Amino acid sequence: MTSQPDAGGHFGPYGGRYVPEVLMAPIEELETAYLAARDDPAFQTELADLLHNYAGRPTPLYFAKHLTETLGGARIWLKREDLLHTGAHKINNCLGQALLARRMGKRRIIAETGAGQHGVATATVCALLGFECVVYMGEVDMQRQRLNVFRMRMLGAKVQGVSGGSRTLKDAISEAMRDWVTNVGETYYLLGSALGSHPYPMMVRDFHKVIGQEARRQILDAEGRLPDTLIACVGGGSNAIGLFHAFIPDAAVELVGVEAGGRGNALGEHAARYRGGAPGVLQGAYSYLLQDEHGQIALTHSVSAGLDYAMIGPEHAYLRDCGRAQYVAASDTEALDAARRLSRIEGIIPALESAHAVAEAIQRAPDSTGKIFIVNLSGRGDKDIDIYRENFPELDQQELNQQELNQP
Amino acid sequence: MTRPAMTRIGRLFVSLKRANRKGLIAYLTAGDPSPLRTPALVAAMVRGGADLIELGVPFSDPIADGPVIQRAGERALQAGTTLATVLEIARQVRANSEVPLLLFTYLNPVLRYGLERLAADAAAAGIDGCLLTDASVEEAETYVGAMHRHGLDTVFLAAPTSTARRIKLVAQYSTGFVYLVSRTGVTGVQDSLSASVAPLVEAVRAATDLPLAVGFGISKPAHMAELGRLVEAVVVGSAFVRLIERNAENPTLETQLEAFTRELKSGFGAIA
């Protein structure tokens, strides 16, 4: 497999730069600055220092003994990105891009957020490095992720509600792009997933590939061999590409991305791009996209705001086309069940996004005796407590039935 | 690359030059407030003196548009407007008028329809050219090839921030005219014009002999005079769309649209 992407940001036919001309100059400026930073040892040293001392890397690779024993098949390891500062893998990318913004002489950072994890991570690095920060967030997402809205404000960010379109992640991205076009001189757009125009999918991947590099070393230390299967949830796909990337040359390692299967198969009921999606262009990139027969972007649904997006990152589209990775879906219910089970038997409340990956591991493990799985536990579940409460009303009663509690 | 034979757009700029006049390019979102209404709105703009009509095809995620055109797109989609609907609108306009028509939209609806199929159907419907705001010159080769094979012009945007290398590519891929963005920002109404237009005009003139039009944020007759001195045509979009939005229910909408077009056009008076 040749090195991806090419100079124009293409992963096979996917990716590229599909943006209005007014955004081309800032995109080119960003690319030039990133390529220089990437090759600058001083930049990498400072980033590594912050990742270690501020964010808490390396994260553990934890053997999920009880999950493994209960399922009775594969040995399941969890890559604990949920233990990072701010509670999810997103901080890896935010630290990298914020250092880049400082290097470029910008003073204002804007970002979009779905679940709010990327918004919180952005607000955090802006507080740390002294940037003005504006986070665009769909009004629907602001409602369902109120805690993260408050966290961002406490960190000094302005959370700008987006009322256009479906009032979710894709509308927040459009609004952030409009802000960028208008305030391009002083503003850095800190995109949070492996999406959008080149160089974002490449750059975001590069900042997250530390996940897979660590996991590869850790599993070799612990098991003395490479894993059989990697499992990660895929919205835009940043945590998944971060875990997968170091293993791409290891042809025997199976890569599994888990999309949001939502609550049904009809368009609008899920965010599984390989369930009825077709290649198209959205917000700067060419990739698999949920759209109607007229090329209008479809509404999506997932219980998890972070997976609720119509397009999959272009590198994932490429990995699937060439057969290197496979993509499956877990439903809302499967993700909720997985979250409850992991909480009960491992003492880890996962983010709803990550629970989709756990659900797939639960599905596969019993038939995989002798195999080793690494599941990317990309975030912790604190932000999702309101949704868990809604879905597990029996845990929210004043007097709990002890018997019920003991059933995971 | 083979260039299309001269379209109505090319002939318009020849005749403007011959008459020593400047052109007014009028944008509206097709299907706003309803597809049935659009041909009459176009006719009103033409009566008021619009020289070229940009027919906006609504897209669900218009990253390059400001709130006025975003809302128009939402209304048009709500009214059931599709690319096929807009082609039908073009056919109706073409039945009564020789006004040059430029499709103005985003790449995804066009990819979904099929590039080659759209080029053929648009040409048959009497459309003269196409502008896709998110088809950057890097990714435009297939699209440009399909349009040119069917005799359609391809118009690209140049911005004040465009580098010399990019301006060269924009000039190379554009036919009909080059659309200059008056400022960085999304489409929308503003009160004063950016001083960055003049250097941009100079840079693009150095790269091509094609006629130039300036757009984004132009809403007043005074703007027409100011820009008419620099370029061959001026584009007005959001100001028309806002008028349509505010008067969608008003039986005098067509009359008002015609009068506003005439008022804008009169702005050229001093220099024409």
Image (spheres, helix red, strand yellow):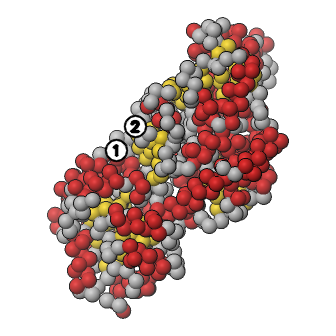
The one nearer the camera, A56 or B189, is A56
Residue A98 is situated, as x and y percent measured from the top left of the image, at 70, 53
- For the point 25% across and 48% down, the residue is B116
- For disc 1, the chain is B
Residue at 65 percent across and 16 percent down: it is: A372
Q: Is residue A358 above or below residue A56?
A: above
Answer yes or no: is residue A124 visible.
no
Q: Give the x, y percent position of residue A376.
A: 66, 28
Residue B37, image x and y in percent? 29, 61
Q: Is residue A398 visible?
A: yes
Viewer-proximal residue among A293 and B44: A293
- Check disc 1 and give the amino acid type: Arg
Left or right of B91 on screen, residue A303: right
- The reply, left or right, for residue B139 in relation to residue A133 is left
Q: Amino acid at mark 2?
A: Ala
Q: Which residue is mark 1?
A: B112
Q: Quadrant of the N terminus of chain B?
A: bottom left
Quadrant in which residue A118 is drawn: top right
Q: Nearer the viewer, residue A8 or B145?
A: A8
Whether discs 1 and 2 lie on one chain: the answer is no
The Cα–Cα distance between marks 1 and 2, rounded to whole angstroms, is: 9 Å
1 and 2 marks in contact (CB < 8 Å): yes
Of all chains, the one bearing label 2 is A
Q: Residues within 10 Å of mark 2 (few under 14, many from 20)?
A: some
Q: Which residue is mark 2?
A: A278
SS at circle 2:
strand
Where, by quadrant of the figure, is residue A175 drawn? bottom right
Tell me what residue is drawn at x 48 percent, y 50 percent: A8
* Quadrant location, the C terminus of chain B: bottom left
